[in-house]
Image (spheres, helix red, strand yellow):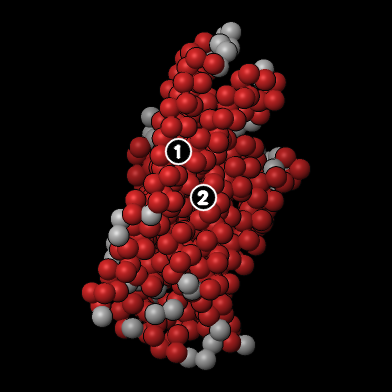
């Protein structure tokens, strides 16, 4: 119940301010545009790099979103109000996590067609497998991301700290997502990339749990 | 009160210095030549103990961070920071000594081999750890943040290792995996070196946590 209220609060904020999803989408469009200029020289080779580029884009996009995710709390000092309300700190974390996860998925849903249209991204396998992969990977990114941005944005240099901490922590996620995307794009069966799905599931479960348990320590004044 | 005011520390430091020279002597004169590697192999007596020390440091960070978050006793935070600093110095030394060995033996200084990649990522993570200590705001808060990052990093390391291992299975594997095959003379020198480096580690941990404790005391006095 509490959790639903917290998620709803995030949605209200997003609908009013329209900060996260739009800034994330616009940023990815800009990146796609640059990619198509930068890699124009070798269109034949380009498809091999595309899964990696897609996840690099989404990683940068998630940083943009994460930097916004605590901004309202920071500017209006709504964070203190949120913390003084009788909700469990772990639920605040989960609420933020679920909301950000949905925003990230929305932004990606708007961006993926552009990858298909401008950069010729093709999937020989089933699309729904790729969507499931996106959902899983985004959960992993959001789980760590919300924790890091919860810390980073209450420090000096938060804008630098978030990517500096996030990128190395997420390296296994990006490897796994890239490998799985290549496999799905080539139409390989699940047995060829189930190891990567296991990595993603392990990562998501472990880090959401750690986030749930340690968010109390992060959000204290 | 300086670190060397205590007799215990003086004796420990002195003993370690002597053992370090003995260690150097055994590595140069006692260790047998390995036929196809010649002198390049000697770095093994440094490189592996360095990695051991880095591991000790980072393992310490995980344990001390968890105990700090539970107990909120500054003592553990001091130890966690000391362990992180010492661990990172050794981590940097691994990253320097590794390529020195790899250049003549593998023919190139760096490959994206799992252990190398994991060490590099670990090093980057701990740069972030020190940044959050530096910019995290008041002492109470930044040490809590650092503890969380310490825990996150130590959980992430095995996942990173397996991911990278599977990512590039064709890359030449690290030599340490078949270490048991070496002659016993090699192993004796190696274990002595490992012991020496562990002593150095203990010295550094004690010194660093002593200095940190003094800094915190001074900070408290200023606040009173």
Q: Are marks 2 and 1 in contact (CB under 8 Å)?
A: no
Q: Which residue is mark 1?
A: B15
Which chain is home to disc 2?
A: B
Quarter of the picture containing the N terminus of chain A is: bottom right
Q: Nearer the viewer, residue B135 or A190?
A: B135
Which image quarter: residue B220? bottom left
A140, above or below A95, in the image: above
Give the residue at x 53% y 73%.
Answer: B71
Secondary structure category for the residue under label 2:
helix
B21, above or below A170, in the image: above
Say if residue A141 shows up in the picture.
no
Which residue lies most toward the front here?
B7
Relative side of A92 to A182, left or right = left
Q: Position of residue A31 (x, y in %)?
A: 37, 49
Q: Position of residue B36 (x, y in %)?
A: 57, 9
Which image quarter: residue A195? top right
Q: Which residue is mark 2?
A: B58
Say if residue B18 shows up in the picture.
yes
Tell me the crowding category of disc 2: few under 14, some 14 to 19, or many 20 or more residues within 10 angstroms, Cα based.
Answer: many
Q: Position of residue B59 (x, y in %)?
A: 56, 51
B8, above or below B198, in the image: below
Q: Nearer the viewer, residue A191 or B83?
A: B83
Give the residue at x 48% y 65%.
Answer: B76
Q: Position of residue B43 (x, y in %)?
A: 48, 23
Q: Nearer the viewer, residue A89 or A174?
A: A89
Foreground tag (2 vs 1): 1
Which image quarter: residue A178? top right
Spatial separation of the CA atoms under disc 2 and disc 1: 25 Å
Secondary structure category for the residue under label 1:
helix
Q: Which mark is residue B148?
A: none
């Amino acid at each position: 119940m509490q959790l639903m209220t917290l998620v709803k609060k995030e949605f209200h904020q997003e609908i009013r301010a329209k900060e996260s999803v739009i800034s994330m989408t616009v940023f990815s469009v800009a990146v796609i545009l640059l990619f198509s200029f930068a890699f124009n020289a070798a269109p034949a080779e380009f498809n091999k790099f595309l899964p990696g580029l897609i996840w690099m884009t989404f990683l940068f996009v998630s940083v943009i979103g994460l930097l916004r995710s605590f901004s309202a709390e920071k500017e209006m000092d709504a964070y203190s109000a949120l913390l003084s309300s009788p909700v469990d700190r772990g639920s605040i974390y989960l609420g933020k996590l679920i909301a950000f996860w949905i925003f990230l998925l929305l932004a990606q849903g708007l961006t993926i067609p552009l990858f298909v249209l401008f950069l010729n991204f093709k999937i020989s396998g089933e699309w729904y497998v790729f969507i499931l992969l996106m959902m899983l990977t985004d959960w992993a990114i959001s789980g760590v991301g919300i924790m890091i941005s919860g810390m980073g944005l209450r420090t000096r240099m938060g804008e630098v700290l978030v990517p500096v901490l996030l990128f190395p922590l997420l390296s296994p996620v990006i490897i796994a997502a890239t490998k799985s995307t290549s496999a799905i794009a080539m139409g390989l069966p699940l047995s060829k990339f189930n190891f990567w799905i296991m990595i993603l599931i392990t990562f998501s479960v472990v880090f959401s749990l750690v986030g749930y348990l340690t968010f109390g320590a992060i959000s204290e004044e | 009160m300086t670190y060397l005011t205590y007799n215990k520390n003086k004796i420990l430091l002195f003993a370690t210095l002597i053992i370090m020279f003995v260690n150097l002597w055994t590595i140069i004169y006692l260790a047998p030549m390995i036929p196809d590697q010649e002198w390049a192999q000697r770095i093994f007596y440094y490189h592996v103990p360095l990695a051991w020390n880095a591991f000790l440091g980072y393992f310490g960070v995980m344990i001390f961070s968890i105990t700090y978050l539970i107990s909120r006793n500054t003592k553990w935070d001091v130890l966690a920071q000391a362990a992180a600093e010492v661990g990172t110095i050794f981590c940097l030394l691994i990253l320097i000594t590794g390529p020195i060995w790899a250049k003549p033996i593998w023919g190139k200084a760096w490959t994206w081999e799992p252990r190398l990649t994991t060490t590099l990522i670990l090093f980057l993570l701990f740069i972030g750890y020190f940044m959050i200590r530096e910019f995290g705001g008041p002492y109470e808060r930044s040490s809590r943040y650092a503890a969380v990052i310490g825990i996150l990093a130590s959980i992430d390391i095995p996942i990173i290792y397996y991911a990278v291992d599977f990512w590039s299975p064709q890359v030449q594997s690290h030599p340490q995996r078949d270490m048991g095959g070496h002659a016993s003379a090699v192993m004796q020198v190696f274990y002595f070196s490992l012991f020496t480096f562990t002593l150095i580690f203990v010295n550094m941990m004690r010194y660093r946590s002593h200095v940190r404790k003094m800094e915190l005391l001074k900070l408290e006095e200023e606040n009173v």
